[in-house]
């Protein structure tokens, strides 16, 4: 019987999900001196990099440079990419157990949390995730349509995703046409009649989740005015006391920027973005034709919960805003994976420091998790690195202790190719990347994306 972990019989690791959490895990395995390991990374899409490709805003090109780090990881001879391969159908947990010593799941948080208010299912009510994936050219969302003939749009939430949506809606076509935004989205936004975007936060400005960089950008748009209001910007006693007791330079800097928006940054601009606080959507109201025509809004105040958290409480005051298009961005949750214990209320895989556990906390040997499906939707791209390292350290510990699968098969590629003939290797992706970049170079853009799986297959196999 062969001894695993040797040069002749290296440890075999499968990673499900080719986003940052998956690549950071592979990178940490390869950094271990004297460790003989092979890492196979699977993704449902032909393209790797997860939300770096499909979630980062097209006008944030510098953030996408992290893919160069991922490319270095992928260049390791012990790395393979199985793109266009779906866990649960093209490959099962039983298949992985027969071929690998360990499996690491990093499938992210794929769906938005609902608002839970009447009228949420009306036409022209959407999740922010759908819109972001649409303008980024995600194959699953390219077919969607958004009614950009509406002049007033509400974006519920004040995190970075919400502010990305507002910024894209407020930018001019000249600002967008030098990015890698999907061509169909660029065409639709060129015809947009949106004049006013309302960003809505249920708590106050001191609790806003967006980053300093994101909010500063709202004041730098070419033809859009960012506006805040005195009655919402004046800090309540609880927020002021909390900031005094717990000084935070980032929060203070964000407040400085928001205060500079009082009265508007460009009063003569053709578009306006209101950044509103202490407001909550209570109901989306029908325009009489089955679509959103207005929003019932409730005014909030800040209260001290007594546990160190400042919460929003209704004042009882309500008013109505005429809006024709609504995007919700109030949190995200993962989707359960076949064969794995899932905490439905939290939207994550049951785990302890990345070790998958049963509902009662017993470790599931050989199974691990990282990224948003492990910890919930928090942090930025770089947050996934220490998160992945924590899990991989547990995996290394368990390999040493003999706590792992006992695979009876060696190379899984023939099995996977028999089920998915259009499997994409990393070399296939690099070729696709070259083609997209070449298409973009002709028009001064970073790339022009292929946005359907069929199109990607055709250009590589044709």
Image: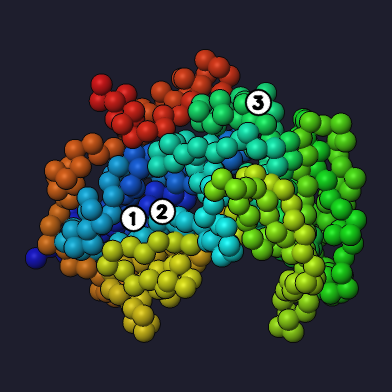
Identify which residue is drawn at 54% across, 48% down.
290
Vertical placement of 88 versus 85: above or below?
Answer: below
The secondary element bearing badge 2 is classed as: helix
Q: Quadrant of residue 427?
A: top left
Which is more foreground, mark 2 or mark 3? 3
**Observer-nearest of 432 and 193:** 193
Q: Which residue is mark 2?
A: 22
Q: How far across and how far down the image is residue 57, in percent?
A: 59, 40
Q: Position of residue 48 (x, y in %)?
A: 40, 42
Farthest residue toward the front? 288
Q: Give the vertical position of 38 relative to 77 (above or below).
A: below
Label 3, residues with CA under 10 Å away: few <14, some 14-19, many ≥20? some
What's the mark number on residue 173? 3
Vertical order, 112 against 217 (above or below) = below
Quarter in which the C terminus is drawn: top left
Q: Are marks 3 and 1 in contact (CB under 8 Å)?
A: no
Residue at image coords 14%, 43%: 418
Q: Which residue is mark 1?
A: 15
Q: What residue lies at 68% left-to-right and 55% top-to-bottom?
A: 295
Number of marks present in the image shown: 3
């Amino acid at each position: 019987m062969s001894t695993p972990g040797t040069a002749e019989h290296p440890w075999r690791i499968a990673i499900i999900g080719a986003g940052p959490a998956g690549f950071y895990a592979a990178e940490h395995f390869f950094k271990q001196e004297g460790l003989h390991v092979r890492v196979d990374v699977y993704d449902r899409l032909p393209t790797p990099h997860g939300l770096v490709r499909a979630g980062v805003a097209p006008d944030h090109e510098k953030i996408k440079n992290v893919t160069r780090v991922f490319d270095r990881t992928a260049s390791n001879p012990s790395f393979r990419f199985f793109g266009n391969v779906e866990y649960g159908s093209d490959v099962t947990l039983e298949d992985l157990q027969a071929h690998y010593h360990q499996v690491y799941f990093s499938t992210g948080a794929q769906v938005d949390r609902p608002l839970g208010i009447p009228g949420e299912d009306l036409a022209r009510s959407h999740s922010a995730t759908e819109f972001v994936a649409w303008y980024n050219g995600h194959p699953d969302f390219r077919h969607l349509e958004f009614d950009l003939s509406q002049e007033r749009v509400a974006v519920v939430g004040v995190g970075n995703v919400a502010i990305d949506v507002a910024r894209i809606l407020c930018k001019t076509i000249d600002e967008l046409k030098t990015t890698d935004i999907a061509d169909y989205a660029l065409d639709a936004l060129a015809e947009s009649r949106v004049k006013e975007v309302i960003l809505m936060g249920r708590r106050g400005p001191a609790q806003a989740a967006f980053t300093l960089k994101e909010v500063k950008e709202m004041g730098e748009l070419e033809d859009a005015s960012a506006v805040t209001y005195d009655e919402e910007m004046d800090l309540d006693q609880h927020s002021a006391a909390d900031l005094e007791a717990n000084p935070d330079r980032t929060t203070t800097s964000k407040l400085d920027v928001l205060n500079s928006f009082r009265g508007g940054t460009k009063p003569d601009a053709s578009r306006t973005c209101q950044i509103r606080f202490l407001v909550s959507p209570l109901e989306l109201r029908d325009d009489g034709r089955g679509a959103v025509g207005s929003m019932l809004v409730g005014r909030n105040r800040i209260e001290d919960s007594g546990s160190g958290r400042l919460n929003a409480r209704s004042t009882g005051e309500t008013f109505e805003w005429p809006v024709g298009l609504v995007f919700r961005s109030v949190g995200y949750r993962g989707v359960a994976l076949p064969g794995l214990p899932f905490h439905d209320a939290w939207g994550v895989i049951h785990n302890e420091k990345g070790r998958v556990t049963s509902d009662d906390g017993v470790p599931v040997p050989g199974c691990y998790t990282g990224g948003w499906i492990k910890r919930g939707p928090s942090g930025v791209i770089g947050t996934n690195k220490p998160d992945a390292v924590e899990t991989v350290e547990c995996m290394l510990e368990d390999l040493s202790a003999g706590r792992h699968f006992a695979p009876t098969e060696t190379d899984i590629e023939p099995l996977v190719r028999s089920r998915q003939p259009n499997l994409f290797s990393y070399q296939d992706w690099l070729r696709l990347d070259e083609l997209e970049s070449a298409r973009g170079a002709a028009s001064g853009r970073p790339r022009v994306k292929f946005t359907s799986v069929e199109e990607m297959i055709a250009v590589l196999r044709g």
